[in-house]
Image (tube, rainbow, N blue to C red):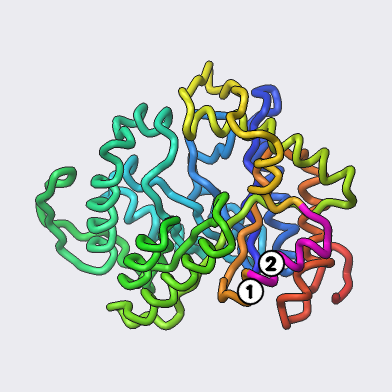
Amino acid sequence: MDFCIQLSAYYPDKNYGGKQLYQDMLEQAVLADQCGYEAVSITEHHLISILLMPAPLQFAVKIASMTDQVKILTSVVVLPIHDMRVYAGELICADIFTDHRLMLGVGRGAFEFESSRFDVPLDISREKFDESLNVLQALLSDEEVSWKGKYYNFKALTVMPRPENKLPIMMGVVSPSAIYHCAKRGFHIQTTPLSGTHQHMLDQVEAFNTGKAENTENDDDLSLSLSRVTFLSNDKKDRERIISQAHHYYGQFDNVYTGPGIVENGMIKPIPRNVPISQTKNNLLIAGKDEMIDTLSQYAEAGVDRFIMNINFGICQQETLDCIQRFSEDIMPTFTRASVVSKSLGVVK
């Protein structure tokens, strides 16, 4: 099982500044590359103070310029808010500029506040996403594409330059049914168990394997990525502190995900959570070394190809870097056969 870090884009105070925010993320990406992580992932979100990354393709190019091997995943690009005729060319260029280390993760969007302000409210985002994805695939694979649909209507055109290779596309989906149908169509999959049971995770893996076996594109290299909010704690006291901080952070997340979307001057207002902190504790993978290995072993044994370690819940930069380093030293060697070379320490583990 390979490992990926979702770069932490937390903007708690405007005085922190965008320059510092993205320097932090670059520092995380460079460390991940040095520590032997297979990939890093970046979100796309606009107008809000969490998960903030309005230019994921540009940032992917910057990451590639400062790293040697790590793959760069978008987790995920919100297709319905882009014009595919423009985006296809930007994507081809980003693939070239990252030396083909880019994997495009796509989704429909999740925050009503964000989507509605781009005139794509969530109640239409599914059908616009479906058409946008079909248009994007056509523009990337065919020349002289014309289109007549609900959201796109254009005469024949050819996106230039042409792709140098087939660009991998990863679908962000959760339900086993959606996973099956997307894998069957030849898409890589990113999913999450959320608060589901172990059986739910097994159902997700089975759906992927079934869809992959039946895929119409004959893609044998399709991968299943599983993302979960994760932190490697030092001890029980440290674990409780991190869980408390995550619980507070999710008061902001809930506001824009399932709540009223109260945002003032770009800053999300925390709201009281409807779930007790004990449920937050169960939903997140915040654990010490032994419990972490036990849990990840279940994912590896089930057949997950890539585990995406999401540390996006308001942890300070130094703690984030420390977790990335310790995870590579204490956890990853259990699951990866290749030696992990830490350039920052100059040792082979």
Residue visible at 53% across and 59% down in the picture: 73
Tell me if label 1 and label 2 are in contact, CB under 8 Å.
yes
Q: Amino acid at mark 1?
A: Ala
Q: Residues within 10 Å of mark 1 (few under 14, many from 20)?
A: some
Q: Which mark is residue 231?
A: none
State the quadrant of the N terminus.
bottom right
Left or right of 37? Residue 291 is: right
Q: Look at the image and give the residue range highlighted in magenta.
A: 287-298
Left or right of 98? Residue 176 is: left
Report the magenta stretch's main SS.
helix
Residue 160 x/y as whole percent: 28, 60
In-front residue for pair 107/345: 107
Residue 83 x/y as whole percent: 28, 44
Q: Which mark is residue 300?
A: 1
Residue position for label 2: 296
**Total residue callouts:** 2
